[in-house]
Every structure is written in C-alpha cells, then in structure tokens.
Amino acid sequence: MDALENVDVLVNTPCLEYWYLLHLKNTRKFYASYSAFEKDLNAKPITGYNKSRKYYVARPGIYAKLKPNMLNAYNRAKQLGNYDPKNPQQAKAEIYRLFELLGIIMK
C-alpha cells in the first residue's frame, strides 16, 4: 500500500485507554482486548473509569486527573516504540506522537 501524504496513523493497542494506563504505571503488558485490560486501568486517580459521556463530563475531568503524570505517560509510550504490523501483539500507545507532530515539547 502506498503511503498517503499528510496522514499519520497513531495506533493504541488495545485502545486509547492504554495511554491512560501509562499515566498510572509503567507497563509493557499486551492486552488482547479492552475487557482484559479494564481491571488494571481502574486505579487512582481514575478509579471508577468507564467509557461513558457521564464519566468524561464529570468534574474534575480526566485530563485534570491525568495531567500530573503526562510526562511519565509520554516517556513510557515512547519507550514502547512504534507499531509494527508484522508483530501486532505488542502494547502500543502511539498517541505520544501527537505531541511531536504538533511540535509540543514535553518537559
């Protein structure tokens, strides 16, 4: 398949919430599904997390809860490396690349 100009695909395995988990702990564990991973995600400061609008609009928001550990998550995600389609069963949170694409320096 030819590469598309100006398109970057950011893979998060098994889901975006793996990025959230990296705010909470340093892990390389691969989860085949969200349900296999949900228990590990449910920890302070996001105890009771669920994929619902109600959770996301509640105060304080998820951003405020995770922001103090953003640099940790960024570094942990970067250490996981980029997605390899030849080896898909690896934990990935490429969302860290969004900061790089936008030129945001993490300190």
Image (tube, rainbow, N blue to C red):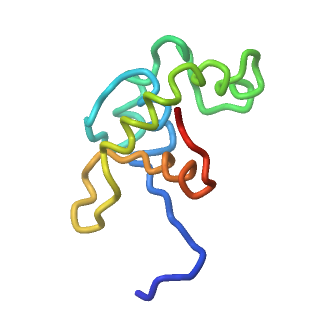
Quadrant of the rendered structure where residue 57 is?
Answer: top right
Q: Residue at x 30, y 67 (%)?
A: 85
Q: Please determine whether, in this image, residue 101 is positioned above or below residue 53.
A: below
- Residue 29 or 50: which is nearer the viewer? 29
- Residue 53 or 70: which is nearer the viewer? 70
Q: Residue at x 56, y 52 (%)?
A: 98
Q: Residue at x 39, y 36 (%)?
A: 75
Q: Residue at x 71, y 22 (%)?
A: 61
**Where residue 27 sits in the image (x, y, percent)?**
29, 30
Classify residue 6 as left or right of residue 54. Answer: left
Q: Please determine whether, in this image, residue 107 is positioned above or below residue 94.
A: above
- Residue 78 or 48: which is nearer the viewer? 78
**Where residue 4 sits in the image (x, y, percent)?**
53, 82
Image quadrant where one finds the N terminus: bottom left
The outermost residue toward the left is 87
How many numbered marks, from 0 up? 0
Classify residue 61 as left or right of residue 42. Answer: right
**Where residue 2 sits in the image (x, y, percent)?**
44, 88
